[in-house]
Image (cartoon, rainbow, N blue to C red):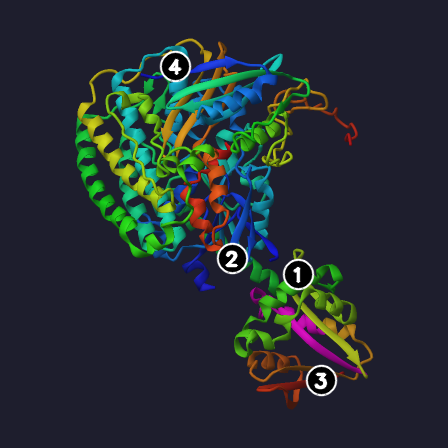
Amino acid sequence: MFGLKQSPWVIHYDASSCNGCDIETLACLTPGFDVERLGVLNTGDPKHADIFLVTGAANEQSHAVIRNIYDQMPEPKVVVAIGACACTGGIFRECYNISGGVDTVIPVDVFVPGCAARPEAIIDGVVQALAALMDRRKAMKALGKNVDQVLYSRAESADAARILSLQKTAHQQEGTIYGEEHVPGLVQTLPALEVELTQRVFIKATVNGRLVGVARGYAQDRTGFISDVIVHPYFHRCGVGRRLLEELEKALPDMNRFEASIGDKCVESAAWLQRQGYELYKTDSWRPAIARVYFQKERK
Amino acid sequence: MARTIIPFGPQHPVLPEPVHLDLVVEDEKVVEARPSIGFIHRGLEKLAEKKDYVEFVYVAERICGICSFIHGQSYCQAIETIMNVTVPPRALYLRTVWGELSRIHSHLLWLGLLADAMGFESLFMHSWRVRERVLNIIEATTGGRVIFGSCKIGGVRRDIDPAMITHIQSEMKTIEKEMREITTVFMNDRSVKSRLCGVGVLTKQEAYELGCVGPMLRASGVAQDMRKLGYAAYKDIPVEPITRTEGDSYARCAVRSEELFQSVDIIRQALERIPDGEIAVKVTGNPNGETIMRTEQPRGEVAYCVKATGSKNLQRFRVRTPTFANLPAMLKVLQGCDLADVPVLVLTIDPCISCTER
Amino acid sequence: MTPEQTMEPIAVETLLQRVQKMHEDGYRLVQIHATTLPDKLEITYSFDLDLRLASLRLHLPLEEPRLPSVSTIYGCAVLYENEMHDLFRVQVDGMTLDFKGNLYKTAVKFPFGSTKAPGVTCAAIAPAPTPKPAAGAAPVK
């Protein structure tokens, strides 16, 4: 995550400001201040962004928008409230349509004062946000390592949308190797997943209510088939996958053996399966030009 | 053909401010645009009941951070008209200088955003680079970059000394030269022309009927500019409205480009002819009366309706901002346009949503 | 230098006729705004022709104010009229584009509306005093 610190991507939203802070935020990106030379990029897509710059106080109609943008940003993320209005409501505090600062809607990490906030102050705020971003990243890793704080439970049909979003994130590497159309996890639709949820066993891992991993499988002729174990990239190498696999095996009792299959080019996944005690037993051609390797494990 | 509704905004890469449009499209053509506003509605008109009329200058300046000074100036003029205050001539000239500096910085900002909407990134950066020079002058004379707080009822708060006047005059030369380079690109570049010429045409009749103001109206051939009312120093420095007849996005860009140099000229004349004397008079008592004050902002005519009943709080404060008047025209030009032209067309009215929704 | 502003009181019944006349004379609609006076609602229509500002003014009762729409004459009036409805609770009949109270979504309904109008409690005008519960009192639901 070195790049996160070296090149944070920011997204800007005007909650209900007078424009003063907005144009100063934009001025930071243009000659004179030019934070792009330091790697700070302005993006219009919440899913690309690490830092959320909010200007203006929160009004009745912008609540939902602020929340929506915030929810769509990937973890770890930090919020910078720019200007007096975003911090406290400022001069508009007493207006009937203003509920106060942005912190009345979402958690804010850095407050940048000023009316309008000066570009220097905004840049300073972003630098402080970087420190907060790195702290959050560390905390997330620590949380992932401490398996006791990850909650493992059966997934329900209500989780379908979140599982779909997670599997689209987690299968990106395979998509790059084989092409997206050949990865079942990337082409699956929400209705298809909802059906699958009723037919197979799903175990989910959650941290603070946030879905970070899913394992799914099914039983057939006393063999437990492990269809998929996915973990959010931030929680890789934290033991979440191992625990998910264990829980899934427990949820499929009375099985003599377990079987899992993956694409032959997914060397990292193959190595991981071998670390979990699975052994390679056969290879076949799944689709033209895609070879598949099969792993198995006897129940002890 | 089946119709599709595409939501545009409120958070959109091309918009620094939130506005939401439901674009009804048939294939790639926009058939209808339905706006929904209110994302920045603060309700500041109601603040007049809580803040007294002197304090309210600060609120008026914060209606919008781009044309902040002219908002403050218009409000002060409205109160001064009601209270029959004679503002010293030097203050009127200073207001004119700051007002025109605001206009230059606003138009440069708009030109940059337009270039950004067209995908002409380098032009965007150059426009904003020159704008920084203007902001430097503003900062040197008022202390603020975008919100100055230098206007007050009865005059202005700060004076400009002769050394600073010389500095501004020499700086204006550089700014004018650099603006000439930028506007030459806007007016002559093939890629700019291909995005703007013939896009979003508004005839003279349509523009007038739809209640357009400012550059929108002038680009369609109506010579209307509130500075001709002769407020501040415009009674001594005549302003001839700059008009074009095509009524398309290119004409709107041309009008704003030429207004940059008109403003430079006004600043130059104002600084040469600035009279000596006081910069403010003391104002006592409470306003009692009513007026509708109109001034010319970068985006067009703004109307301040102020009604006072002799107490320190105004009975009614209402501002009709230029973008509010230009919104119907925006919806009109969006009808029948290509979906890919929507960002440019939304920007050609120079939308200031903070102003509009107050 | 500043041309005189004119303000002419009219009756609600003659509104459409007068606005139609303005339109025929080539006036541009500058703005429409409402003001809450202690006993009535004041509506002002301002028009411009060659920098001359002519305003028409009419009064409405505070309770259930109603007004015919001028949007068939001046299309751009819809925004002003919707605004009047959302902020002042003025019922404008026959708007060519009716947002049905959704132009502004405000935390307080009809924030400028009269407190005397039935069914309106306007926190912005008269904030209800928050009763302080006595120590140990059960929370009021």
| Label 3, residues with CA under 10 Å away: few <14, some 14-19, many ≥20 | many
Amino acid type, mark 4: Glu
Task: From the image, tell me which residue sits under label 3.
Answer: A297
Pointer 1 and pointer 3: residues touching (CB < 8 Å)?
Answer: no
Circle 4 or circle 1, nearest the eye: 4
Tell me the distance, in whole angstroms, between the alpha carbons under discs 3 and 2: 55 Å
Q: Identify the element where label 2 is drawn.
A: loop
Q: Identify the element where label 3 is drawn.
A: strand
Tell me if A241 is positioned left or right of C5 in this view.
right
Q: Which mark is residue A162?
A: 1
Q: Residue at x 20, y 44 (%)?
A: B177
Report how many numbered discs are placed on residues in the image: 4
> Where does the image place residue A132, in percent across and percent down from the top left?
49, 52
Amino acid type, mark 1: Arg
Q: Identify the element where label 4 is drawn.
A: loop
Residue B320 in the image: above or below residue B311: below
Tell me the distance, in whole angstroms, between the alpha carbons under discs 4 and 2: 50 Å
Task: From the image, tell me which residue sits under label 2.
Answer: B28
- Give whichever of B340, C15 is nearer the camera: C15
Tell me the distance, in whole angstroms, between the alpha carbons under discs 1 and 2: 33 Å
- Give whichever of A276, B177 is nearer the camera: B177
| Circles 1 and 2 on the same chain | no
Circle 1 or circle 3, nearest the eye: 1
* Residue A159 is inside the magenta segment: no
Which residues fall within the magenta stretch? A222-246
> Where does the image place residue A198, in percent across and percent down from the top left?
78, 68
| Label 4, residues with CA under 10 Å away: few <14, some 14-19, many ≥20 | few
Chain under callout 4? C
Which circle's residue, 1 or 3, is located before the other in the chain? 1
